[in-house]
Amino acid sequence: MVHVPYRGTAQATQDLIGGRIDLIFDNITQALPHVRAGSIRGLGITTARRSTAAPEFAPIAETVPGFDVSSWFALFAPAKTPQAIIDKVQADTKTGLTDPALRAKMDALAAEPVGGTPAELAAFLQTEMKKWGDLIKEIGAKAD
């Protein structure tokens, strides 16, 4: 494979659909509508397990044991945000994620909300930083 740098996923997807590149690694939430429309073909997902919303895609881990590269999104606020505001945002977000209309939209995109407390997010971030930090050191990757 030859790495072709793109500034964003939109142009890469256009080039994939147009046959100018052979494949891309992309977030399932962006790619799935194109797969379902038949304009691109899904080959696999990078998570360790199958997506409940798109179980037809085999995880790469079924071919490459231990492979697990997940994308995720989180809400962040400035460090000095009062705890009462953090608690309110968390509670409102948790409530919002139970909204049937929002869940239907997220399910259509294979977005699987996890939710959790700020402490759980902090622990997850520490795990991610260690995992990727160790890999960066191991392979000697450098930012260009």
Image (spheres, rainbow, N blue to C red):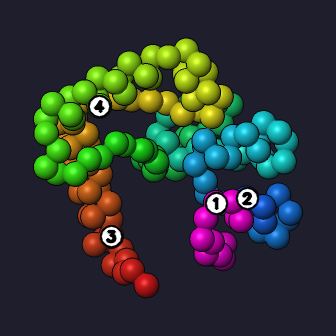
Look at the picture and state if 115 lies above or below 75. above
Q: Where is residue 89 in the image (x, y as percent from the top left)?
A: 29, 31
Circles 3, 1 touching at the beta carbon (< 8 Å): no
Classify 10 Å Cα crowding around label 1: few (below 14), some (14-19), many (20 and above): some
> Residue 89, labelled with which disc?
4
Distance of label 3 from label 1 (alpha carbons): 23 Å
Q: Which one is earlier in the sequence, the residue at label 2 or at label 3?
A: 2
Q: Which one is earlier in the sequence, the residue at label 1 or at label 4?
A: 1
Q: Nearer the viewer, residue 115 or 83?
A: 83
Q: Main secondary structure of the magenta part?
A: loop
Look at the picture and state if 25 lies above or below 37. below
- Secondary structure beneath dot 1 equals helix
- The stretch of residues the image draws in magenta is 1-12
At label 4, which amino acid type do we have? Val
Q: Residue at x 55, y 22 (%)?
A: 103
Query: In front of the other: label 4 or label 3?
Result: 4
Distance of label 2 from label 3 (alpha carbons): 27 Å
> Residue 84, labelled with which disc?
none
Q: Name the residue under label 1.
A: 9
Distance of label 2 from label 4 (alpha carbons): 34 Å
Classify 10 Å Cα crowding around label 4: few (below 14), some (14-19), many (20 and above): some
Classify 10 Å Cα crowding around label 2: few (below 14), some (14-19), many (20 and above): many
Query: In front of the other: label 2 or label 3?
Result: 2
Distance of label 2 from label 1 (alpha carbons): 6 Å
Q: Which one is earlier in the sequence, the residue at label 4 or at label 3?
A: 4
- Secondary structure beneath dot 2 equals helix
- Please tell me whether residue 9 belongs to the stretch shown in magenta: yes
Distance of label 1 from label 4 (alpha carbons): 29 Å
